[in-house]
Image (cartoon, rainbow, N blue to C red):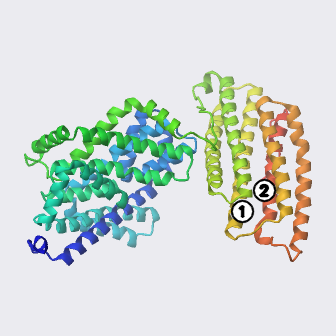
């Protein structure tokens, strides 16, 4: 047995160190480059995705473009999940972007197949110089991206040089031949390796270095590529654990896309291997390209064909994941599109369009109140996450609706229409501010739970009563706005005085409890701030009610 390992003279210590060190530099480099590119792009990525993915087909092209830039299909998927959760992207649009991300991630394998590794050192020097000798933060981010790019290729070169020493080792040859003869082992190997490394680009890069040694049969290499595509879905699955139904559905789409493709291509492995072999012999055999491109061809081909076929089944995929992961506790909102074509030709319809969007926004605020109330009574991260999701929705909705109303206000409107535009803008601002104050409550209780501050039973009773009052005020103020119901608005207006009186009373109760040495509540518990934010929520509900009652343009005094 020992003779098998000693058949070829290898300095095992140096070889193992080179493989591990090269792998470490490669993984760090690809991660540094991806994170730096995301920082450079910043929030513009989300804005770009939101505005350019109104159909699944556009989503595919956008997914390709974004992933090719940030070099991470997992990062693109994470951004998409956030947009779906924020109500900015529908699930069919998300499916398109995920499809495109799988094509975009193949760019890495094409880059790795080039001879850029010869210039890894000067590339790293340029990146490091920008980081250490330039004060501008944006330039430093560019430097980090360039440094990561150079490290990626330096690590591959170091690792590839060490792996080449193994190509004549009998046990290594036998193991790789076994993978070629039993392709299912290749699929499992690829999936397992990608799960461990958490990067399909990284495992494809390693495979390219192995394939270049000539030790890996093409059929086995393609089987590993198929396995890599299954393994990469684990990142999105892990990211969705404990998340909303939207996050889980998006992750399931990613899993189904890659799994269906892998199963089909595994069944057709022999003809696909022959096709890749023909392409490789045509281009590589002619001396135009190096053998590493063979793996790139296999990777690109898999994803292109997979996207082309499954694109025609987007609706079926959406239906399947929706049925597989039904929504229970999260907020369902209508898919309202603010139609800009109505602005000039039909301002009355545009006002109705905006009203539907504001109603949607109000429903999100209602849901956020319930999640906040639940989190107030129990330290449940699920409730906190759902409430934070609502806050993100409210901020985004506020910006989109306000922009729409500003554009509408610039049209030739009647006095009545102009007044409704102004009132709608005020209502949108009030709903958004309600979300901000609920977000403050979440932060206060998060700190309380972290500090293990136990709420006094009287404090709990007081908060329950106040929550019930603002719950009623939010419901009635929104219904008053929707139906222009002055009776409901008047009830909200009258209740405002009661909320103010109770908050003042409960502040005094809290001071008295602080003087009680047996009380575990203390100033660090933010109880006074909690009361103040609840009072502000009541104020904003009253603002909406006064808008319904008032015939003027003016908005009540803004509360902060």
Badge 2: residue crowd in 10 Å (few <14, some 14–19, many ≥20): many
The residue labelled by disc 1 is: 444
Place of residue 368 in the rendered image (x, y in percent of width and height, measured from the top left): 69, 47
Residue 55 or residue 249, whichever sits in front:
249
Q: SS class of the residue under badge 2? A: helix
Q: Is residue 332 visible?
A: yes
Vertical placement of 542 versus 453: above or below? above
Residue 152 or residue 415, whichever sits in front:
152
Residue 192 or residue 515, whichever sits in front:
192
Place of residue 44 in the rendered image (x, y in percent of width and height, measured from the top left): 49, 49
Vertical placement of 25 versus 417: above or below? below
Q: Which residue is rendered at x = 64% and y = 41% of the image?
A: 331
Quadrant assignment for the C terminus: bottom right
Q: Is residue 48 visible?
A: no
Q: Nearer the viewer, mark 2 or mark 1?
A: 1
Vertical placement of 3 versus 534: above or below? below
Badges 2 and 1: C-beta atoms under 8 Å apart?
Answer: yes
Please give the label number shown on residue 222.
none
């Amino acid at each position: 047995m020992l003779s098998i390992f000693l058949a070829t003279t290898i300095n095992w210590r140096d070889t193992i160190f080179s493989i591990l060190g090269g792998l470490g530099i490669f993984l760090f480099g690809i991660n540094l480059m991806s994170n730096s590119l995301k920082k450079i792009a910043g929030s513009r990525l989300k804005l770009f995705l939101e505005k350019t993915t109104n159909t699944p087909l556009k989503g595919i092209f956008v997914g390709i473009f974004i992933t090719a830039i940030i070099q991470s299909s997992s990062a693109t998927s994470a951004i998409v999940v956030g947009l779906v959760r924020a109500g900015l992207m529908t699930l069919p649009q998300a499916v398109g972007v995920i499809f495109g991300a799988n094509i975009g991630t193949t760019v890495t394998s094409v880059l790795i197949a080039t001879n850029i590794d010869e210039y890894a050192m000067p590339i790293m020097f340029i990146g490091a110089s920008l980081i250490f000798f330039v004060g501008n933060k944006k330039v430093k981010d560019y430097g980090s991206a360039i440094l990561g790019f150079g490290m990626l290729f330096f690590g591959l070169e170091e690792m590839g040089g060490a792996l080449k020493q193994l190509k004549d080792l009998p046990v290594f040859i036998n193991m790789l031949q076994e993978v070629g003869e039993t392709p299912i082992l290749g699929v499992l190997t690829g999936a397992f390796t990608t799960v461990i490394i958490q990067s399909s680009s990284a495992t494809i890069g390693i495979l390219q270095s192995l394939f270049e040694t000539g030790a890996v049969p093409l059929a086995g290499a393609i089987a590993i590529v198929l396995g890599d595509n299954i393994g990469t879905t684990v990142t999105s699955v892990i990211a969705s654990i404990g998340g909303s139904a939207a996050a889980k559905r998006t992750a399931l789409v990613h899993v189904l896309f890659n799994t269906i493709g892998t199963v089909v291509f595994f069944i057709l492995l022999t003809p696909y291997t022959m096709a890749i072999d023909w392409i490789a012999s045509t281009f590589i055999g002619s001396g135009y390209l190096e053998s590493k491109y063979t793996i790139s061809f296999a990777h690109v081909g898999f994803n292109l064909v997979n996207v082309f076929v499954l694109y025609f089944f987007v609706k079926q995929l959406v239906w399947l994941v929706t049925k597989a992961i039904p929504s229970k506790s999260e907020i369902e909102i209508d898919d309202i599109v603010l139609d800009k074509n109505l602005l000039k030709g039909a301002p009355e319809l545009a006002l109705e369009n905006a009203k539907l969007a504001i109603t949607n926004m109000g429903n999100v605020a209602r849901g956020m109140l319930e999640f906040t109330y639940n989190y107030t009574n129990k330290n449940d991260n699920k409730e906190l996450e759902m409430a934070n999701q609502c806050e993100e929705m409210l901020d985004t909705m506020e910006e989109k609706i306000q922009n729409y109303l500003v554009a509408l206000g610039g049209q030739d409107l009647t006095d009545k229409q102009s007044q409704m535009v102004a009132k709608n803008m005020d209502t949108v601002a009030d709903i958004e501010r309600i979300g901000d104050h609920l977000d403050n409550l979440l932060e206060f209780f998060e700190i309380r739970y972290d500090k293990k501050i136990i709420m006094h039973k009287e404090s709990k009773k007081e908060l329950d009563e106040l929550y019930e009052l603002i719950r009623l005020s939010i419901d009635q103020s929104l219904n008053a706005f929707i139906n222009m119901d002055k009776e409901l608005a008047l009830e909200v207006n009258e209740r405002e005085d009661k909320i103010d009186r109770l908050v003042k009373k409960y502040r005094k109760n809290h001071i008295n409890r602080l003087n009680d040495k047996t009380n575990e509540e203390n100033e660090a518990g933010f109880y006074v701030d909690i009361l103040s934010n609840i009072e502000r929520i009541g104020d904003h509900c009253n603002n909406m009610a006064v808008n319904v009652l008032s015939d003027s343009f003016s908005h009540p005094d803004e509360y902060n």
